[in-house]
Amino acid sequence: MRILVLNPNTTASMTASIRAIAEASASPGTEIVATEPLWGPESIEGHFEGYLSAAAVLDRLATYDEPFDALVMAGFGEPGREGAQELLDVPVLDIAESAAQMAMMLGHSYGVVTTLDRAVPQIRDRLLTAGLLGRCAAVRGTGLGVLELEADPERTVGAVVRIASEAVERDGAEVICLGCGGMAGLRDRVSAALGGVPVVDGVAAAVRFAESVVGLGLSTSKVRSFAPPRPKAIGGWPVSARPS
């Protein structure tokens, strides 16, 4: 089985971190291929950058020539997932919905710890659209920008633990979801600092769900909502040239 993991921003070091946790989480025999768009924002912190990234992600997929059995979209709450479901014939999973789905199997309510506070409404909207907001106790920001997560790992862990503790103690969250692909790999340290509260890494959860969906011989329904795009002229599309 070959799973493509797509970082929605163009920061290669973040792609490498996401690849590492995806490979560590995959079952024996599962090959992980990780990449990022060929153009677009270096990080996604708001709707404007999110929609630019969605176009860049779809462009990357439209010009990606290697075969794969499932796609994991490693942005937490960014747009574009539905477009990928229309474009591709393989299962498409995103880390926000995968993390929330897994968290609800582990506790009555869950909390999401993310980056900047401005990301909170966007994540809540994504969970609402997915039908997953009802059991979300809180979505809280750490105040750290996406690119800051890698700059000082100790500061990042401290901030995530502090905000996660608030979600558990004040909001009643029983499980914590790491609300950014850039937080990949923090799960064990955060869980230990919280006294064993389950912590879900969305990249790891999505990889495991992808394996299950492919293993069961299932994929995205094409009968209505995610039917393939209708054939028509799209000026300037795709933006990037296919590799020769």
Image (spheres, rainbow, N blue to C red):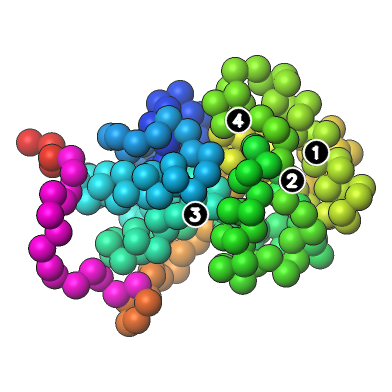
Marks 3/1: CA–CA distance:
23 Å
Q: Position of residue 237 (x, y in %)?
A: 16, 51
| Label ID, residue 163 | 1
Earlier in the chain: of badge 3 and badge 1, it is 3
Q: Residues within 10 Å of mark 4 (few under 14, many from 20)?
A: some
Q: In which quadrant of the rendered view does residue 101 lie? A: bottom right
Q: CA distance from mark 1 to mark 2?
A: 7 Å
Q: Are marks 1 and 2 in contact (CB under 8 Å)?
A: yes
Q: CA distance from mark 3 to mark 4?
A: 21 Å
Residue 94 is marked as 3
Q: Earlier in the sequence, mark 4 or mark 2?
A: 2
The amino acid pointed to by label 3 is Asp
Residue 227 magenta: yes
> Sequence-wise, which precedes: disc 3 or disc 2?
3
The amino acid marked with disc number 1 is Ile
> Tags 3 and 4 in contact by the CB under 8 Å rule?
no
Q: Quadrant of residue 214?
A: bottom left
Which is in the foreground here, disc 3 or disc 4? 4
Give the numbered dot on residue 140. Answer: 2
Percent x, y for residue 174? Answer: 83, 55
Magenta-tinted stretch: 226-240
